Amino acid sequence: MLFMLIVKASKNSESGNFPDVNLIEAMNKYNENLINSGVRIMAKGLKPSSNGIRISYLKPGEKPVVTEGPFEEIQELIAGFIVIDVKSREEAIKWAMEMPDPQGYGEGQIELREFF
């Protein structure tokens, strides 16, 4: 079963603030555990939305609207993701619960979603 652990953006990640060295080490250890367990497929961080482009389909049959970032609704943005291949939903939750606070400032939030 494939799941994506979606790391939600925060004011700090959108400002381009990197976590402190302790959190970077903790995240590296977490990723090593995922790799050594054979469940990690891919993991990437994303640049702030100021580097992003949004394409919106506002009306059927019409051309989409292109908007350059940054985007204001931080709670809807993604700062990074990890794709894991596990045997069950419970195992995916277990791995998600082991991730350190991905923002390190008490702003971290992870959304866990299963692929079709």
Image (cartoon, grey):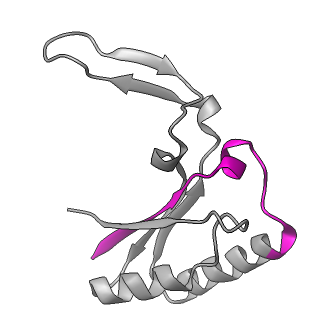
- In reply to whether residue 82 is colored magenta, the answer given is no
Q: Residue at x 26, y 63 (%)?
A: 115
Question: Could you say where residue 25 lies in the image, as x and y percent from the top left?
Answer: 78, 76
5 above or below 54?
Answer: below
Residue beneath the point at 18% across and 16% down: 59
* Extent of the magenta region: 1-22
Q: Which residue is outermost to the right?
A: 21
Q: Residue furthest top?
A: 62
- Between 64 and 71, the one lying in front of the other is 71
Q: Position of residue 29 (x, y in %)?
A: 70, 82
Q: Please check the rendered image and state whether residue 21 is part of the magenta-colored stretch, yes or no.
A: yes
Q: Is residue 102 above or below residue 49?
A: below
Locate the N terminus and report the quarter of the image it occupies.
bottom left
Left or right of 42 in this view: 63: left
Up-down: is 46 above or below 2? Answer: above
Q: Position of residue 95 (x, y in %)?
A: 47, 84
Q: Give the camera-side residue of 14 and 40.
A: 14
Residue at 77% from the left image edge and 70% from the top image edge: 24
Residue at left offset 63%, top offset 81%: 30
Percent x, y of residue 87: 29, 87
Picture quarter with the C terminus = bottom left
Residue 45: quadrant of the picture: bottom right
Q: How many marks?
A: 0
